[in-house]
Image: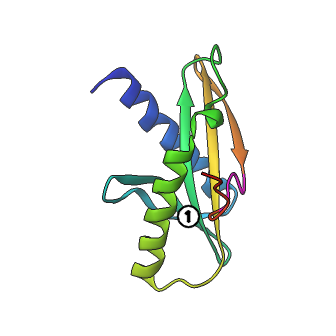
Amino acid sequence: MAKHNEIGQYGETLAAAYLQQKEYVILHQNWRFGRAEIDIIARQRQVIVFVEVKTRSNDDFDAPKDAVKRKKERLMIRAANAFMEQIGHEGAIRFDIIGIVLHGDAFQIDHLEDAFFPGFFYD
């Protein structure tokens, strides 16, 4: 497996553990719909939370959360709609980004809740 894939998987494992510590219930990891993948689907009380995880091995470049572009947001929204239809969820949802920067054996987690909102695209 390529090094960047290993780093990504490690970051997703850290993010899932972080969310569980915050009393989120992990419903799925790496859920796919067509070309879209949602790294983590969790539930926080009655809210379904769709989480994109971005992991970096250093902070020399943009913050991990800045790597989520509009195209990725659109794909996540499409996949989220399919997931909600599949499970019959008509309640509240949220899109979060978790950025993780690795510092040797240590790491820093930045959790951005409500990172973007479906329907607020201008182009």
Residue 88 percent coordinates (x, y): 47, 86
What colour scheme has been applied to the protein in the rendered image?
rainbow
State which region is magenta.
Answer: 113-117
Q: Within the image, what quadrant is residue 107 found in?
A: top right
Q: Residue at x 27, y 27 (%)?
A: 1
Q: Within the image, what quadrant is residue 85 found in?
A: bottom left
> Eyeballing the image, is 58 above or below 16?
above
In this view of the protein, which residue sits in the foreground, 48 or 23? 48
Q: Within the image, what quadrant is residue 50 found in?
A: bottom right
Report the magenta stretch's main SS: loop
Q: Residue at x 61, y 31 (%)?
A: 64
Residue extending farthest left: 1
Which residue is denoted by mark 1 in the rendering?
Answer: 42
- The answer, for residue 96, to whether it is visible in the render is yes
33 in magenta = no
Q: Is residue 86 left or right of residue 19?
A: left
Mark 1 lies on a secondary structure that is strand
